[in-house]
Image: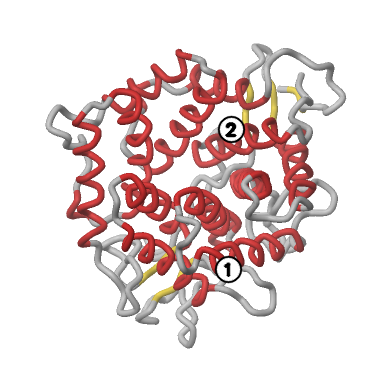
Amino acid sequence: MKQLSPQNPPALKPWSVRMVESTLQRYTLNDARWHYEHGLQVMAIQKSAEATGEARYMRFVFDWIDRFVQADGSIRTYRLDEYNLDQINAGKLLFGALDRTGDKRYRKALHLLREQLKTQPRTNSNGFWHKKIYPYQMWLDGIYMAGPFLAEYARRFDEPATFDDVVRQILLIEKHTRDEKTGLLFHAWDESKGQRWCNPVTGCSQYFWGRGIGWFVMALVDVLDHLPQEQARRQDLIAVLDRTARALVRVQDEGTGLWYQILDLPYRKGNYLEASASAMFVYAFAKGVRAGYLPKDFLFSASRGYQGLLQSLIKIDAQGLLTLEKVCGAAGLGGDPYRDGSFEYYVTEKIVPNDPKGVGPFILAALEIERAGANGGIME
């Protein structure tokens, strides 16, 4: 594989399209799972279909959805009683499917996922547990999994009080996980303070994991799309996005424009520049500027991050297929085997090229940069 040079001559296809094409050659419907990371990647392909008008991309999206959504609106392999926020994320695809077809089974499936959130276990302070198996725990990841879905559902199905709940979740986890010194957010918070991974005084996990904050800032820019202008605490969410984005710019790598797996410890042995977090930050910054949630100077940071992805983490094989390198395959807390949230844990988790959790955000980031015209024309 060859490393990309930004000086390569222009070609016809933007990087978003090239990554979608590469993904469709690697990913078959036999690989499909009703799972947050698959849903993220397919949603990125759906966004590319909308941007390009490419019917083949949209057919793929519908074929993917229809492997799961049954005639009665049930979702194959989904179980409401797991109370797993991760399983909500793929449901975001159903809004577009309903718009394009009017098919009642997509509406029923949306209502089914909404039912989970009506009875999702909550902390004493009214935050969603990340999963039933993780009692009294809120993770940054869960804000992305459930927040944008719930905000869009509230807008479409006229649940104005639900907007308050969406905002509550975001402000609650920011309150408990934000570090006053750096402005960064710890990965998770255990209200019960009983987990071995948490600080016994604050309940927070120990480190600033890049993708955790990536999920959070992506959630913010997506939730704000659906939140009414008159919503009482809309400006509070914009302020959260702004201060979190400023904290992220302070830890952006000067040389590459990328971000590290553990954001604030770039020189510690084992740490590395990580693709999924970097792509998530590029997406959130570029979209935040476009939508007016962030000042225009964040587009410079987004452009630097995007160029870093192209120069350092995108490789091209002999067939012209793209590979996104240095994607953290997984990171969580607790469970069995137990994940202790140590620095060593985060930096030794497997690295997976073309993991959907990196590919999806890369496509979304590329679409935003291309839309902004900020280095989106640099192609091979």
The residue sitting at 70% across, 65% down in the picture is 247
Where is residue 57 shown, x and y percent of the image? Answer: 46, 19
The residue sitting at 17% across, 54% down in the picture is 81
Where is residue 2 shown, x and y percent of the image? Answer: 75, 23
Q: Which residue is mark 1?
A: 185
Q: Quadrant of residue 63?
A: top left
* Residue 348 visible in the shown view: no
Identify the secondary structure beneath mark 1: loop
Q: Earlier in the sequence, mark 2 or mark 1?
A: 1
Where is residue 61 shown, x and y percent of the image? Answer: 39, 24
Give the residue at the far bottom of this rendering: 201
Query: Considering depth in this image, is 164 or 259 the residue closer to the camera?
Result: 164
Image position of 299 (left or right of 31): right
The amino acid marked with disc number 1 is Leu
The amino acid marked with disc number 2 is Ile
* Residue 286 visible in the shown view: yes
Where is residue 370 shown, x and y percent of the image? Answer: 69, 30
Query: Considering depth in this image, is 287 or 226 the residue closer to the camera?
Result: 226
Q: Is residue 77 above or below residue 164?
A: above
Mark 2 Cα within 10 Å, few/some/many (few <14, many 20+)?
A: many
Query: Considering depth in this image, is 75 or 102 the residue closer to the camera?
Result: 102
Tell me the number on the disc at residue 91: none
The residue sitting at 40% across, 19% down in the picture is 60
Q: Which residue is mark 2?
A: 363
Q: How many marks?
A: 2
Identify the secondary structure beneath mark 2: helix
Q: Quadrant of residue 126?
A: bottom left
